Structures are given as structure tokens and as C-alpha cells.
Image (cartoon, rainbow, N blue to C red):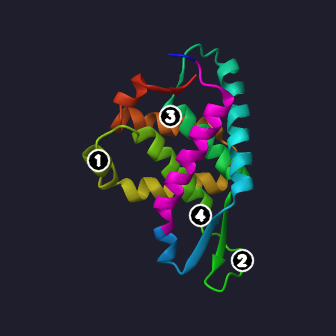
Amino acid sequence: MPRKSPSQIRKTRSETLYAVWYKIVEEFDRLALVPKLNAKTVAKVVEDYIAARDAFVARYKIKDRIQRPKVAGLMAASILKFKPVEMNDRDHSPVYESTQANELLALWHGLGICAEGASQKSIEAFISTPHFQTWRGDLLCLFEQHPASAEAFVMIFETLSLSFFPENLKRSDEK
């Protein structure tokens, strides 16, 4: 399969980020908060991801396309670095306290990449496991406390894939 160009990678990463974003907006609506995804910051996130991905590929001498968990972990670190989600209350006043909005985006975006192509049944099976809420809370805490831990995030998403979406470890996302 031919190597993807940087512009194709930018397009894929941006589209995936926005697709996940629209799915989690509902959670904030219940909190009476109005989230906004800043397009300029999303562009910075994607550029940072591309640079981190290139460094990762060079460091580990990856010759083929990189696996989805690696994309998920590197994108999570870029999301947490630039924080593209801006929160406002219903009066459009900025909200400065922690809403974990960027952390939630990083989590669901990573899960979406790891589960891409998996059946709805296997995704629901993972989300309905008895320990999912604990895992989710612990990962959100890790994201908040150690946002620059890209390689740790890669390993977390790789473990997630090994456990619940092993078919995606055979498939890769981009060269």
C-alpha cells in the first residue's frame, strides 16, 4: 500500500478528531456547558502529531505503517498539549475550572481509533465491562496529571487493543 502524504494524514487526523468531537458534545450539554473545538488549535494538534509521529517512526525504525494504538497515543498527547476544547457556560462566559473536556476528547478519540472497524457489539462489550468507569477515570486522571506522556499513552492504547480489539493490531493506519 502506498505511503500516505502529509496532507492525507492531516485530513484523516482532522476528520477523525471532529467526528469524535461531535459525539461527545452531548455529554457537556447535560452539564449546561457549551464546548467549542477551536479550528486553529486543531490544526496545531495535527501538525504536532505529524512531527511526533515522524520522530516516533525514526526512533523505533518503523518501516511499515504504524499501528492504530500508536496513532491514538501520539494524538492524545498532542490534544493534551494544545487543548483545542474551549468551554463556555450558557451565557458564553469562559469556564476556567477543570472540565476534563480535552482529556475526554483524547480518551474517546483514542478509543475510536483503537476500535475503528470493530463491530458495535465489541465496542459496547468493552464500554459495559464492570471496570470501564474506573479505567476511564484513571486514564482521565493520568491525562490531566501527565499530559506529555505520549509513549505511556501509546502503551495504554496498545494494551486496550490487545485486550479488546486485537484485529486492529494487524491493520495499520498510515505509513
Badge 3 is on which residue? Answer: 69
Magenta part of the chain? 3-25
Q: Earlier in the sequence, mark 1 or mark 3?
A: 3
- Circle 4: is it few (<14), some (14-19), or many (20+) Cα within 10 Å? many
Q: Name the foreground residue: 149 vs 122.
A: 122
In the rendered structure, find residue 41 and report the number of the disc placed on it.
Answer: none
The residue pinned by badge 4 equals 101
The three-letter amino acid code for the residue at tag 3 is Pro
Quadrant position of residue 134: bottom left
**What residue lies at 59% left-to-right and 64% top-to-bottom?**
100
How far across and how far down the image is residue 96, in percent? 71, 74
The disc, 3 or 2, on the residue closer to the chain's N-terminal end is 3
160 drawn magenta? no
Mark before the other along the chain sequence, 2 or 1: 2
Identify the residue under disc 1.
Answer: 120
In the rendered image, the residue lying farthest to the bottom is 91
Ranked by sequence position, the earlier of labels 4 and 3 is 3
Q: Pointer 2: what residue?
A: 94
Tell me whether the residue at label 4 lies in contact with that at label 1, contact meaning CB atoms closer than 8 angstroms. Answer: no
Relative vertical location of residue 131 with respect to residue 76 in this rendering, above or below:
below
